[in-house]
Amino acid sequence: MATAAKAGIKDFVFEWEGKDRNGKVVRGETRATGENQVMAMLRRQGVLPTKIKKRRMRSGKKIKPKDIALFTRQMATMMKAGVPLLQAFDIVGRGNANPSVGKLLNDIRADVETGTSLNAAFRKYPLYFDSLYCNLVEAGEAAGILEALLDRLATYMEKTEAIKGKIKSALMYPISVIIVAFVVVTVIMIFVIPAFKEVFTSFGADLPAPTLFVMGMSEVFVQWWWLIFGIIGGGFYFFMQAWKRNEKMQMFMDRLLLRIPIFGDLIYKSAVARWTRTLATMFAAGVPLVEALDSVGGAAGNSVYTLATDKIQQEVSTGTSLTVAMTNANVFPSMVLQMCAIGEESGSIDHMLSKAADFYEQEVDEMVAGLSSLMEPIIIVFLGTLIGGIVVSMYLPIFKLGQVV
């Protein structure tokens, strides 16, 4: 079925009702290209269909990492409770609010039902299940502890998404204020300043330099507002595309972000937290170190750490200890290096790296809370200076006129 869907054949969701081998009435839903395929699938399962009805699919929203984390948590919970794998897929797929997730899970379930291993089914969708996810699922299947590793995966993804959310919230506040300030200034320049200009023209007197400067800016906005918005919007779009697609641009921006005052420290600590959390999770699952490092670099969310991880992997594969290789990379704080060294000596690297991840996740929480309180006065001063400067500049001629009178 998944093959058919990929080949461009449209598939549908069919609701069915039938009787199993014991004569018990059973109901469910299946994704297929037609009723004949549904009937064949049900007969292979020992179900005699009595009613098959095609259901129109709702347009689904984009599948986000939070959706995958929620699915992983639900699967881990149900498998721990003893629910069979295929039945767990059915329950999660039907109960998900996003139809796109339901379609994805139905496709994966169909692959597993035909004998494909779970990790191989996941690997067909690399956009949603990265190598780290698939490697851990493969390790869980091989060791017979799939539910335990799904639980560990869910915890890892929840913590990672929490860190991302906190960084976004810390950055969103100043960005939104800057956007609002730009809109307010634009409205003042296009609609308010020209009205003052007409009044000042009737005075027939020399205007102060700040007033002339603001009026000149207003003329530029009124005449070229479409070009200003086009340059800003187009520049932002092409900048973001270059950041996403160009490796040199990614490396430059990631290095720059780590050096930005205040926010750079937040991004640095979050990258360290995600790197150590990922490696700890892979170690705990029994994945060999060199193989685990394949999945760790990208998980940090910063190309500086991706490049550093590649160097660490090369050194470790030639017999260098993990602590020495991490020290040579020169991107990790001394605390992480010391805890890694203790972990190597005691044979508990996963435990020590997990403790380091806990520490830096806590540091990120505290920094986000501190930034929220720090940014408020800075933004108030910024807005007061910007808007207040424009207002004072336009009222200076009125003040001068009052002094003359």
Image (cartoon, rainbow, N blue to C red):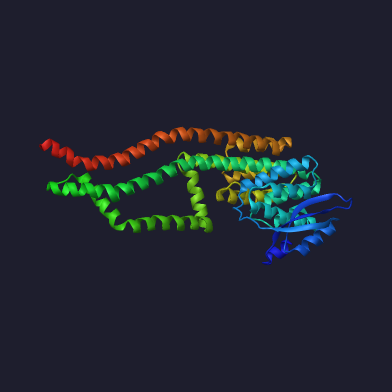
Q: In the displayed structure, does residue 145 sit left or right of residue 96?
A: right
Viewer-nearest residue: 97 or 284: 97
Q: Residue at x 76, y 47 (%)?
A: 88
What's the residue at 40%, 46% (across, down)? 179
How many numbered marks, from 0 up?
A: 0
Q: Position of residue 335 (x, y in %)?
A: 60, 35
Q: Give residue 237's position: percent from left, percent from top.
A: 46, 56
Residue in front for this viewpoint, 4 or 338: 4
Question: Residue furthest toward the right?
Answer: 22
Is residue 315 visible to the viewer in this orientation of the structure? Answer: no
- With 402 as the anchor, is 256 left or right in this view? right
User: Residue 222's image quarter?
Assistant: bottom left
The quadrant where residue 358 appears = top right
Which of these two is toward me, 214 or 67? 67
Location of the C terminus by quadrant is top left
Above/below status of 321 relative to 47: above
The quadrant of the image that shows the N terminus is bottom right
* Above or below for 45 versus 342: below
| Residue located 24% across and 51% down the image | 216
Task: Please say whether residue 95 is visible from this viewpoint.
Answer: yes
Residue 294 percent across, percent down from the top left: 67, 51
Furthest residue in direction front, as rendered: 51
In percent of width and height, residue 70 lies at 66, 44
Residue with the most extreme left position: 405
Q: Is residue 116 left or right of residue 351?
A: right
- Identify the image quadrant of residue 9: bottom right
